[in-house]
């Protein structure tokens, strides 16, 4: 019955997202994308709203009708995912957007803090640490495993932020991760756990691929949080160490090199990256 959350959130997103995009445009909330086209921004706020609207009947029926529509573990991760999306919205609204003097990456935000400037990215990083520590509390993990869990959550959020430089890229990376976890561990548990958020993300992918809207940090944070939770809920301890190593390497590479340029140099990755894009 937990598949109902995915189906319902998808249906709600189909109804809400187009109207939300019009509302963003009417409010003047747009941003120029990588090609200079003006698109609605941030789409992530609409996707999160769709998830919350879908949650209303699901939560009531799960408790009152005893239908088992929501996983018990969702309660642990819900605050983390919603909180991370809010921090992304804070960065989208308080940050200076795509201007050339906006701090970029961890080094840029650290430099801004050292100069006594308000760095929305630094606030987002500290807030994410607080949310990750809260979400992983009470799991009984010893110190090495506890730190690995924290690092995976934080680095996954940051990694999907780095990936979100082309329409649909972050969503495709999430789909590939989900497919790998489900096939590798022969389970649908990740989708059943977070189906509430997956439906709107899939609807949003069609919108971003058509370059009608941009996820913003709100959306990339939301997707990155889902990815991090999937890893912790699915991977064994050896798998978590491998995942952490990959995230660390990709994060370091993203700080000093262009991920988009690296993707363009690999024909298969370039094809997947451009698939479905306008």
Image: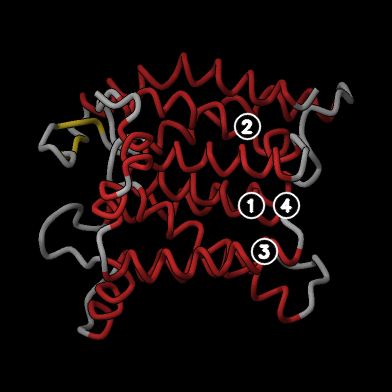
- Disc 4, SS: helix
Please tell me how crowded label 2 is: few (under 14), some (14-19), or many (20+) other residues with Cα within 10 Å: many
Alpha carbon distance from label 2 to label 3: 24 Å
Q: Quick check: 37 left or right of 139?
A: left
Cβ atoms at labels 4 and 2 below 8 Å apart: no
N-term-proximal mark, 1 vs 3:
1
Quarter of the figure that contains the N terminus: top right
Residue placed most toward the observer, 31 or 185: 185
What coloring was used for the rendering?
secondary structure
Q: Which mark is residue 196?
A: 2
Cβ atoms at labels 1 and 4 below 8 Å apart: yes
Q: Which of the two marks, 1 or 3, is nearer to us in this view? A: 3
Q: Which residue is mark 4?
A: 233
Q: Which residue is mark 1?
A: 229
Cβ atoms at labels 2 and 3 below 8 Å apart: no
Quarter of the figure that contains the C terminus: top left
Residue at (25, 27) in percent of width and height: 211
In which image quadrant can residue 243 be found? Answer: bottom right
Alpha carbon distance from label 1 to label 3: 11 Å
Please tell me how crowded label 4 is: few (under 14), some (14-19), or many (20+) other residues with Cα within 10 Å: few
Alpha carbon distance from label 1 to label 4: 6 Å
Cβ atoms at labels 1 and 3 below 8 Å apart: no
From this view, report whether residue 149 is shown above or below residue 181.
below
Q: Which mark is residue 22?
A: none
N-term-proximal mark, 3 vs 4:
4
Alpha carbon distance from label 2 to label 1: 13 Å
Q: Which residue is mark 3?
A: 240
């Amino acid at each position: 019955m937990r598949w109902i959350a995915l189906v319902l959130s998808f249906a709600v997103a189909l109804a809400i997202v187009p109207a939300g995009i019009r509302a963003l445009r009417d409010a003047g909330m747009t941003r120029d994308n990588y090609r200079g086209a003006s698109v609605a921004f941030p789409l992530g706020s609409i996707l999160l709203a769709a998830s919350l609207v879908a949650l209303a009947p699901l939560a009531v029926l799960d408790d009152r009708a005893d239908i088992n529509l929501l996983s018990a573990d969702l309660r642990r991760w819900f605050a983390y995912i919603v909180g991370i999306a809010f921090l992304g919205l804070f960065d989208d609204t308080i940050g200076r957007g795509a201007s050339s003097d906006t701090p970029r990456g961890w080094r840029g935000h650290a430099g801004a803090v050292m100069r006594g400037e308000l760095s929305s990215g630094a606030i987002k990083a500290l807030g994410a640490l607080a949310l990750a520590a809260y979400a992983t509390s009470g799991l009984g993990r010893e110190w090495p495993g506890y730190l690995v869990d924290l690092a995976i959550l934080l680095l996954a959020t940051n990694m999907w932020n780095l990936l979100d430089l082309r329409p649909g890229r972050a969503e495709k990376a999430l789909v590939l991760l989900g497919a790998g976890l489900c096939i590798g561990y022969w389970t649908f548990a990740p989708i059943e756990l977070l189906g509430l958020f997956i439906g709107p993300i899939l609807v949003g992918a069609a919108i971003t691929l058509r370059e009608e809207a941009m996820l913003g940090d709100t959306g990339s944070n939301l997707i990155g949080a889902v990815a991090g939770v999937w890893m912790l809920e699915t991977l064994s301890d050896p798998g978590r160490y491998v995942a952490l190593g990959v995230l660390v390497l990709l994060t370091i590479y993203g700080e000093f090199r262009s991920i988009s340029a690296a993707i363009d140099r690999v024909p298969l990755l370039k094809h997947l990256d451009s698939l479905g894009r306008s």
